[in-house]
């Protein structure tokens, strides 16, 4: 059950962009210090900090297009009404591409809300355990927003407190410093957060989510020993396990399960808190937009009898949420399945209630395998890799022959096996483009990708115009 109400709450001046906003005094703004008086106020404030996570029409968050359409998973499809998505596929985007502007704004809206909480929480009388939990949630969420910004843009301005408008024009902070903050804040958050929440509080950040996000930051820095240290912290909680049925990670009735480390909650309430991928990714033949048509190369990446293919991709003559899928449903003959649902289960197509699991335990195991292998511990890396493959193998038509165990002692062969496993296990879960970049192989895989340019996306031109202290990424 989705329980956190992601209702926006404007408490202080947010540094999101409107024309000339940095040059004007804020008008009609509720003072955050006046608002923070009770425990309920603190809960409302931190609840609002979850709102920018949502993949919904209100946020207009096209992070998925950066990760999926810019990768080798999908082409843009659609009807041409969203030129920025077409530009992402072709690597012809510019600082004026709208998707970068909206993404920047929604991440900094989340950061600002977290800073409001962290700035004012010490000022009120509140139960100590609740103070710890709310502080931990705000630290984790701020870390999550900064991690996504660094993935997309590299160096970005760093704000750890709410500033007046005349102090918002600051330079970019090197991403290494932002990673340090993420790692420190996640460690602190883990000390403050519970391992689990009551069913009525599902979706809130937990100790395991904080440890996992720290592990992911270390992964991107190639600090392999720290990856292993924080993966061990996640595993030592004894709270997570692979679901026997891979598909349970993408079904409405089996969300927030044992494999979910951090899951972004969506609700079909006609209140703008539903998952808009249900419309953006669905075929136009079923009243969707078709803006992520599966590449044939992605389909061919699956080994014979890998059951994850049928959970990830719709193909000819298969059931497709109550209709029979046909080749004509997509220009590539394939469409995504994840995060989609039958029209009979939603009141609005763009308001789906399939959650987005930002961190799954399967991915944590693959981080462990990757770190072990990069440290030369090839045989040890086989163990977590085999855990992931064994779950898939058990659902194959012939488990005796499908997905044989990887038993190589060669580091490069194991590296390729782990990378392959991430591709098929986590397909269309918004990791692929950033994986190709951090592995340094994007130019080998993606036509049009220019080394030294496309590892990051351009800062939005709107932000460049508003803040003279910003410097654009190279070659944009």
Image: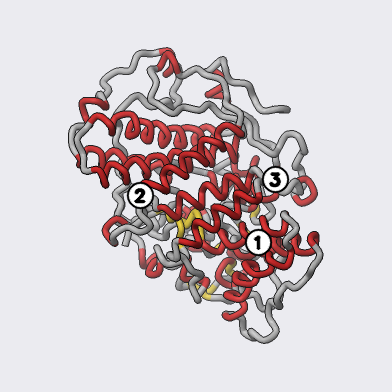
Mark 2 residue element = loop
Instruction: Identify the image quadrant of residue 57.
Output: top left
Residue at (60% x, 60% y) in the render? 427
- Give the distance between the C-alpha atoms of the residues marked 1 and 3, in whole angstroms: 19 Å
Mark 3 residue element = helix
Question: Looking at the image, which is closer to me, 25 or 406?
Answer: 406
Which numbered disc, 2 or 1, marks the residue closer to the eye? Answer: 1
Quarter that holds the N terminus: bottom left
Q: How is the image coloured?
A: secondary structure
Tell me the crowding category of disc 1: few under 14, some 14 to 19, or many 20 or more residues within 10 angstroms, Cα based. Answer: many
Mark 1 lies on residue: 369
- Give the distance between the C-alpha atoms of the residues marked 2 and 1, in whole angstroms: 35 Å
| Left or right: 99 as drawn, with respect to 410 | left
Which numbered disc, 1 or 3, marks the residue closer to the eye? Answer: 1
* Tag shown at residue 212: none
> Is 365 located above or below residue 31 in the figure?
below
> Is 92 located above or below residue 164 in the figure?
below
Question: Looking at the image, which is closer to me, 354 or 439?
Answer: 439
Question: Looking at the image, which is closer to me, 6 or 62?
Answer: 6
- Give the distance between the C-alpha atoms of the residues marked 2 and 3, in whole angstroms: 31 Å
Q: Earlier in the sequence, mark 1 or mark 3?
A: 1
Mark 3 lies on residue: 437
Residue at (58% x, 58% y) in the render? 428
Residue at (65% x, 46% y) in the render? 223
Q: Earlier in the sequence, mark 2 or mark 3?
A: 2
Residue at (61% x, 81% y) in the render? 396
> Is 250 located above or below residue 148 in the figure?
below
Mark 2 lies on residue: 273
Asked if disc 1 and disc 3 are in contact, CB closer than 8 Å, the reply is no
């Amino acid at each position: 059950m989705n329980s956190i109400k992601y209702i926006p709450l404007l408490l202080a001046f947010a540094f999101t962009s409107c024309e000339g906003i940095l040059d004007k005094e804020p008008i009609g703004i509720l003072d955050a210090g006046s608002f923070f008086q009770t425990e309920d106020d603190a809960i409302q404030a931190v609840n609002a900090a979850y709102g920018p996570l949502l993949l919904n029409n209100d946020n207009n968050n096209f992070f998925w297009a950066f990760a999926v359409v810019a990768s080798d998973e999908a082409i843009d499809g659609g009807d041409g009404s969203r030129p920025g998505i077409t530009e992402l596929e072709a690597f012809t985007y510019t600082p004026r591409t709208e998707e970068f502007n909206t993404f920047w704004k929604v991440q900094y809206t989340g950061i600002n809300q977290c800073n409001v909480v962290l700035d004012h929480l010490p000022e009120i009388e509140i139960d100590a355990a609740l103070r710890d939990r709310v502080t931990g949630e705000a630290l984790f969420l701020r870390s999550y927003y900064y991690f996504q910004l660094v993935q997309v843009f590299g160096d970005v301005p760093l704000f750890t407190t709410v500033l007046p408008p005349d102090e918002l024009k600051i330079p970019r902070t090197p991403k290494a410093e932002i990673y340090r903050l993420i790692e420190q804040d996640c460690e602190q958050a883990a000390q403050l957060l519970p391992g689990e929440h009551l069913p009525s509080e599902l979706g809130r950040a937990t100790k395991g989510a904080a440890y996992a996000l720290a592990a992911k930051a270390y992964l991107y820095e190639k600090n392999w020993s720290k990856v292993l240290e924080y993966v061990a912290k996640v595993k030592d909680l004894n709270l997570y396990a692979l679901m026997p049925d891979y598909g349970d990670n993408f079904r409405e009735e089996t969300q927030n399960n044992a494999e979910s480390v951090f899951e972004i909650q969506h609700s079909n309430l006609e209140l703008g808190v539903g998952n808009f991928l249900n419309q953006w990714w669905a075929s136009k033949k079923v009243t969707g937009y078709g803006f992520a048509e599966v590449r044939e190369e992605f389909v061919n990446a699956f080994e014979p009898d890998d059951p994850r293919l049928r959970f990830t991709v719709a193909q000819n003559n298969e059931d497709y949420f109550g209709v029979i899928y046909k080749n004509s449903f997509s220009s590539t003959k394939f469409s995504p399945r994840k995060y989609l649902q039958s029209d009979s289960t939603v009141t609005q197509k763009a308001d789906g209630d399939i959650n987005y699991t930002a961190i799954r335990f399967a991915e944590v195991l693959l981080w462990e395998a990757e770190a072990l292998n990069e440290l030369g511990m090839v045989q040890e890396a086989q163990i977590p890799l085999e855990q992931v493959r064994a779950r898939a193998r058990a659902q194959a038509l012939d488990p005796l022959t499908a997905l044989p165990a990887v038993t190589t002692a060669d580091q490069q062969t194991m590296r390729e096996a782990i990378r392959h496993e991430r591709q098929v296990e986590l397909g269309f879960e918004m990791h692929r483009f950033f994986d190709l970049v951090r592995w340094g192989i994007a130019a080998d895989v993606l036509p049009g990708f220019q080394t030294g340019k496309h590892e990051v996306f351009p800062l939005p031109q709107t932000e460049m115009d508003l803040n003279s202290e910003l410097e654009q990424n190279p070659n944009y």
